[in-house]
Amino acid sequence: GSSGAAAAAGLYRYLRDFCGSHVSWSGVQLRLPEPLPRLREEIRASAPGRYRYYQNSCTQSYSFAWWDWARWEQEIDWMALSGINVAPAFVGQELIWQRVYRSLGLNQSEIDGYFTGPAFLAWNRMGNLHGWAGPLPPAWHIKQLYLQYRIVERMRSLGMTTVLPAFAGHVPQGILRVFPHVNATRLRGWSHFDCTYSCTYLLDPEDPMFQVIGTLFLKELIKEFDTDHIYSADTFNEMTPLSSDPAYLARVSSAVFRSMTGADPEAVWLMQGWLFQHQPDFWQPEQVRALLRGVPLGRMIVLDLFAESKPVYQWTESFYGQPFIWCMLHNFGGNHGLFGTVEAINHGPFAARRFPNSTMVGTGLVPEGIEQNDMVYELMNELGWRQEPLDLPTWVSRYAERRYGSPNAAAAGAWRLLLRSVYNCTGVCVNHNRSPLVRRPSLRMDTELWYNASDVYEAWRLLLSAGAELGSSSTFRYDLVDVTRQAAQQLVSDYYESIRRSFQSHALPQLLTAGGVLVYDLLPELDDLLSSHSLFLLGRWLESARSVATSDREAEQYELNARNQVTLWGPSGNILDYANKQLGGLVLDYYGVRWSLFVSVLVESLNSGRPFHQDQFNQAVFQVERGFIYNKKRYPVAPAGDTLDISRKLFLKYYP
């Protein structure tokens, strides 16, 4: 291999194509044939692009927040086997920032008031938030620093390029006390947060302190971790710049880049291109061009972050000459839910390479959260090495065989059904789970699907029928939970529609029936199913947070961080349910309690003749949601019950 990552990708290709093996987030299948198959001839493969990129800035918080070294090592090895050769190494940067701020004259309370808690650091780093769920205890900084040493060492030993963080222009308020004449302006609030925790200060690009702070930070960072010369900075992530004047935007990007080259003359800036499609009204071609061309051509790499649904390269003349990576975003908030845009990812990268004067330099996986929909990521990783699209039905049948360790017609049939339905969203598809199951109940909930629900029910039946043969496979059991969970999610929508219809037609008996089945049977059964698999346990998420702590007080703070992120996302439900998860414990004690209250309030409304008021319900249900965050209940970290039995029981009751 031309690098460790290339050699590892070759190893995985041999394991996959010749030994029928499989490695993924949800499990491995490594029953190797004996003796190992010998190759008849040498096989050569080269990737059509220089880079295979991995990670979104948000993944750091939605998925990696509480990881220890064992989990990081596993991930980096998976990255190498997948052929990934460039990825961020963002851990531990807050300690470096703290050193820089202290050297500039800020006091500890000003620094503590700036950093968020661990579960929200991604948005602190992008200038969206400050202070929320913080501060960061001293022990956090030390542990993260030592973790980062091991992360960069392991990545580099496998031939991967590490992307380090750089200064984007955001500063703590304390900078204004120490340097009263500094030219800094407050940005507006971000995503339903007011200025208590948002409205970050942005330095003017012409202010001398911009270069002082940016270069100081990067020099300190490089001294600590060395460098591979690629740096990440996002100045305007989901935040409107102070001016749309192209000259101003060019000055900002030029200032960010100069602060990088001040520390490393070979610096290349890697930037997420999310902002361009997120605020297209602001980012017109003239504004995009100004921001990109403020940096010398070839010294910036843009991640076309949502290229499978909203590619930006097409309307920016291939990012006006700057190199870009065609990325699949796929997942928002780490939500559970079967989803994919397989046709778009099977053809999109090849179309981008053929685009007139294309500056595409690779492919990327940039989910906000991981440990879901393994198939889509295996497919995308394979496409990063392909010269042309795959035959998807054939590919997915082989995928099922590798994943479970033996051929099974029913399992392969189930996967072909899922491929053509839930995994084949076309057009502009945003995979944000809006199922009524995981959203605050109301009478105006969206139950529309992009696929035929009966295909999922049939895939469920087929997978169950393969249980006798494949039931000992850990990956099969994971998929059975996931497909049963998807079927249950569809059923929740059906019962919700029945509840809404009954309420609107004043049919109290039908309302009581549908509401009773949902609250007292379907949701508890779903919770039992999820509780039967270790990867679907709320306790696993909460205990991973507590295990990072070095005191009871820290453990409590980290657990509140972890609970808040997957529910209220902010002090008052600012980004409510954005990071929703379907986990054993969460379904019963959070979603289930909300639905119980909703049904009770509707029944009371019909009984009393008083109209239902959503605002009043929201106030009441907020107390339930907040109560869950502070309930201090400890949830199991070990699964209970047999997945096959529970899925079969659900099937016999509910299969339509």
Image (cartoon, rainbow, N blue to C red):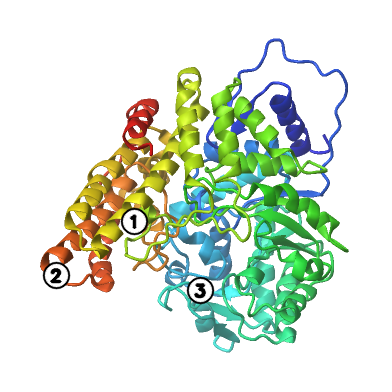
Which one is nearer the viewer's eye here, 5 or 493? Answer: 493
Residue, disc 3: 106
| Label 3 crowd (10 A; few <14 / some 14-19 / many >=20) | many
Taking the image as shown, residue 276 lies to the left or right of residue 140, namely right
Around disc 2, counting alpha carbons within 10 Å, would you say few (fewer than 14), some (14 to 19), or many (20 or more)? few
Residue 533 sits in quarter: top left
N-terminal of the pair, mark 3 or mark 1, is 3
- The x, y position of residue 515, in whole percent, is 24, 51
Q: Position of residue 607 (x, y in %)?
A: 12, 63
Disc 2 residue type (three-letter): Gly
- Dot 2 falls on a residue whose secondary structure is loop
Question: At 70% from the left edge and 87% from the top edge, which residue is drawn?
Answer: 245
Is residue 171 depicted above or below 484 in this figure? below
Label 1 crowd (10 A; few <14 / some 14-19 / many >=20): some
* SS at circle 1: helix
Label 1 belongs to which residue?
497
Front residue of 310/629: it is: 310
Whole-angstrom CA distance, mark 3 to mark 1, is 56 Å
Residue located beneath label 2 in the image = 609
Q: Are marks 2 and 1 in contact (CB under 8 Å)?
A: no
Residue 224 position in % (x across, y down): 65, 54
Mark 2 or mark 1, which has the lower sequence index?
Answer: 1
The image shows residue 445 at horizontal and vertical percentages of: 38, 62
Q: CA distance from mark 2 to mark 3?
A: 60 Å
